Image: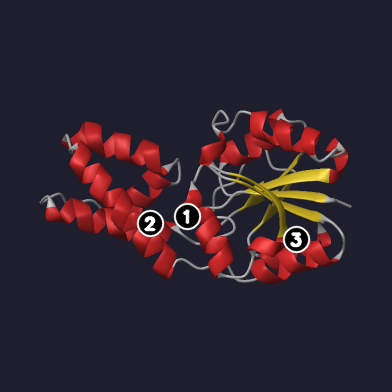
Amino acid sequence: MYKHIIWDFDGTLFDTYPVTANVLREALKEQKIEEPVEEINKQLRVSISSALRYYEEKYQISSEFISNYQERRIEAEVELSRPYDGIQEICKYIHSTNRKNYLFTHRGESSMILLKKHGLVDYFADFITSKHGFERKPSPDAIDYLINKHNMIHSESIMIGDRELDLLSGKNAKISACYFKEGNDDCPYADYTINDFQQLYSII
């Protein structure tokens, strides 16, 4: 049984990619740049910052464009993004069985705003966001910090995410890794693969 469940945010707890991609697509269109939303999604699944670097190099978009996009993105995400089906129930279940949920995201304060807005924040024991300044995934530094702070046993701990780098950060910290898969791709670093959060009940 896993007693410590570490969650990624974007594409795992919350379905933010459609909102983020549409805002970026509309912002690019205003600059007379047409990009398929599928390609934008692909870039965003690496990270928002890497997607912006990609389009900055491809189209020489300005720092003002990036700043305006970030403001519009956060506003839209807070208004429109929702947890995946089953997230509230599984997080509540973990909390009610005297186990612990943790957040590990590269996102900043908006992750906390969304957790509070949707009634999830009280189910979490600790939160690692961009403000903590840890090296980015797949570095194990943030997970190692949580392990030491909360006296976790490695075999009782698991990282859940939708990208290889999420799972690699868990494997690099010597804990288990669960891959939330929305498409047809597999992850070689996954100890478990799910496409519905109901499946977690048989794992944790």
Q: CA distance from mark 1 to mark 2?
A: 7 Å
Mark 1 touches mark 2? (CB < 8 Å): yes
| Residue visible at 12% across and 50% down in the picture | 31
**Mark 3 — residue?**
200
| Residue visible at 13% across and 55% down in the picture | 30
- Give the number of the disc on residue 110: 1
Disc 3 is placed on an element classified as helix
Disc 1 is placed on an element classified as helix
Residue 140 makes an appearance in the image: no
Mark 2 touches mark 3? (CB < 8 Å): no
From the viewer's perspective, tell me whether residue 33 is left or right of residue 68: left
**Mark 2 — residue?**
74
Instruction: Give the residue type that dot 1 points to.
Output: Ser
- Give the number of the disc on residue 128: none
Which colour scheme appears in the figure? Answer: secondary structure
Q: Mark 1 or mark 3: which is in front?
A: 1
